[in-house]
Image (cartoon, grey):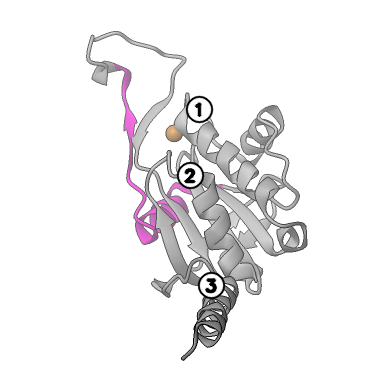
Amino acid sequence: MNAKTKTFTALALLMTVIIVAACTPKVSLPVLREAPDFALTNQDGLEVRLSDFRGKVVIMDFIYTFCPDVCGMLNDKLKVLHADLAEGLKQDLVLVSISFDPEFDTPEMLKQWAIKKRFDVPGWQFLTGTVEQIRQVTDDYGVVYKLVEASDHEDGSSHEHVRGFTHNIMVVLIDRNGMVRKTYGHAFSPVSEMVDDVTSLLE
Ligand SMILES: [Cu+2]
């Protein structure tokens, strides 16, 4: 090969690499399992099933409205995720927040919380149910939570106005076919990771 041919070959190779890189999605998420279905009640008092959203991508988290910090932050993150998605993809993403404090989080309470905190993405579902229904869905999705009694406070103090749970963080990404594709287990995972993941399922 003369120098010219070599340069040409190298260029052609480089172009191929660039084209392949551009055509390959940034992420390729495995299919983990079928997402267990449920029927719960939303902030407008309407029954909502997970299977209602077949054909859409669902991002679902588990929260309680009295949470002093993490649950609100998590929902702020879902809002940013929606904002950061490409314009043409937004309408195919459904946000779902399920309360694990159904005794306190009535539909009306969830509605007020969403208004107060400006969780105002169109179609966002805030779900609650009976204690048994919530126990089932949290078991199905590996959500761990425990009501902390006032007497449990380490300094022995009592805060009657505080309703506290210790809980893990569970955000579940479900594809258009109702399959779990990824879970996020900590509050500080970057939104950009979720944006890439959701985009890979929507495109
Ligand atoms: Cu919380």
Question: Quadrant of residue 85 in the image?
Answer: bottom right
Circle nearer the viewer, 1 or 2: 2
Q: Measuring 66% from the left and 60% from the top, which residue is drawn there? A: 93
Question: Counting other residues with Cα less than 10 Å from the Cα at mark 1, is it few (<14), some (14-19), or many (20 or more)?
Answer: some
Q: Toward the viewer: 136 or 199?
A: 199
Q: Is residue 23 above or below residue 152?
A: below
How far apart are the two marked residues, 1 and 2, measured between alpha carbons?
A: 24 Å
Residue 14, percent across and down?
53, 76
Measured from the top left, where is residue 114 in percent x and y? 67, 36
Q: Residue at x 52, y 61 (%)?
A: 197
Q: First in sequence, mark 1 or 3: give its number.
A: 3
Does 129 appear in magenta? Answer: yes
Residue bearing mark 2: 190
Label 3: how many Cα within 10 Å (few below 14, some 14–19, many 20+):
few
Residue 98 painted magenta: no
Residue at mark 3 = 21
Looking at the image, the residue that sits furthest to the bottom is: 1
67 lies left or right of 156? right
Give, as a single range, the part of the protein colored magenta. 128-150
Q: In the image, what residue type sits under mark 2?
A: Pro
